[in-house]
Amino acid sequence: MRVLFPALAVVVGLIILASLGAALGLDAIFGVLVPYAAFVTFVFGFIYRIVKWAQVPVPFRIPSTCGQHKSFPWLKNRSRIDNPSSWPGVVVRMFLEIFCFRSLFRNTKAEIHYTPFSADPPKVVYGSAKWLWLAGLAFHWSFLLIVVRHYRFFTEPIPWLVQFLESLDGFMQFGVPALYMTDGLILAAVTYLFIRRVVVPQLRYISLPADYFPLFLIFGIVVSGMLMRYITRIDVVGVKELAMGWVTLHPTVPDGIGIMFYIHLLLVSVLLAYFPFSKLMHAGGVFLSPTRNLANNNRVKRHINPWNYPVKVHTYEEYEDEFRDLMKEAGIPVEKE
Amino acid sequence: MMYDKKLIIPGLVIFVWLMTLPFWYNSGKATAAPEVKIDTPVIQEMAEKKCIEDKQYMREAHMQVLDDWRDEVVRERKRVEVTTGGKTYEMSLQNECMKCHSNKAEFCDKCHDYVAVDPYCWDCHIEPKEKK
Ligand code: HEM
């Protein structure tokens, strides 16, 4: 509770703040200033974090990979994707990681099994655990689709792809306005990701406010978005006017958009501004994972450690040149006469 | 000192480009919200130019009105609705909304195109005939 509550309180506080802002008519602040500031923080914060990471040298290829790496030609069963020796394999591995969450797919669980009424020692049993992978995939893909669909507010004319995704997502033609499948999916996935943290004791133990906060924030964004689409309604044409004002750098604030929109927008702004300074940066970090993005060519290519200081060397040839006479005198064999 | 600049800098450029895409896409374009026309013959004859409910409500929730109407008609066999103001309306998309808003292309479509909504209602319901 002491961990969960602060995260929840902040999100509830933000919702109250947005409602107050809308009620007091501070549209120019919450409709223009805050979103702009959040966007700038997001873009520059993101770049800052990546540049920071890029300053860390990765001198050695970290072969924490499964599968046989390239070795003698007669060694068969080489893993070209799991343990690639050159960049094409790395590209495939990165693609599968980013678009299919391949590492998460290999998630396992470990359990201790006791055999009742027997003297056998308990056994550790490993099994596959795919639910996290499934929920993670459903969450991220839905999120992406929702964001791409939102481009209808930011573009004029609206690109073909956005309209196509919209009709695909609303394919079920369920209700008016048509229910988007991604809305249901993301709601279910976020709920699962939250329940999992609360119910599994080990996970609850390691969960911090920084783990709950993004979940609550995204939950709030999704619920406010769905409320204004399916239940309370807002002036969607007004929203597009506002959004087009941002992207053409002529911000205007149309009247009477509706409080629910300002709640949605403030939560989104906070998510954007919070993003670069939180664990959400895994979005950029996945591209910089050394165990995924480096070919395992340690034995083929020399990778020099950039923080090596210059080492003074004294080769055997030089040694012999220096002491040849003394060596001969002492009867020690020398290579050059 | 940055490592792997050859990959990371292009990556960051792509990131910034993607994030600011709407700014490039729309730059130099004047955009204004669509002006919908309500100058149809039926509306022009009205003394008080008023929709079924007040304008702001219609803007926000006309699709819910239609949805309610559809359920009432198809499920409850109730075709007449009395709304605020004591006026009676027939709960019908074609015979009521489109009687007044007979300029679908200049009214419904204009708005819908702006926010990319494409109601599938017209797969079955018949659009009013318009003079082109
Ligand atoms: C992190 C970014 C965002 C997420 C995850 C998000 C999520 C959602 C979701 C799940 C919905 C429900 C309907 C749907 O799926 O289309 C929605 C609706 C909506 N969102 Fe967002 N949103 C985001 C950003 C924004 C921004 C920046 C705006 C400002 C223009 C915005 C404006 C709206 C509006 C106006 C609706 C109602 C649409 C309708 O009635 O059809 N959203 N949002």
Image: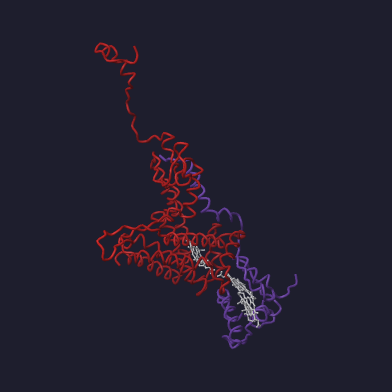
Is A34 situated above or below B58?
above
Which is more toward the observer, B37 or A307? A307
Residue sitting farthest toward the right: B131
* Image quadrant in which the C terminus of chain A is located: top left
Is A108 situated above or below A21?
above
Q: Is residue A246 left or right of residue B103?
A: left
Which is more toward the observer, A292 or B93? A292
Q: Position of residue A254 (x, y in %)?
A: 54, 67
How is the rendered protein coloured?
A: by chain
* Quarter assignment of residue A312: top left
Which chain can be seen in red?
Answer: A
From the image, state the color of chain B. purple
Is A123 situated above or below B14?
below
Q: Position of residue A61 (x, y in %)?
A: 40, 41
* Image quadrant in which the N terminus of chain A is located: bottom left
Q: Position of residue B64 (x, y in %)?
A: 56, 77
Residue at figure coordinates x 35%, y 36% from the top left = A307
Q: Is residue A330 left or right of residue B111?
A: left
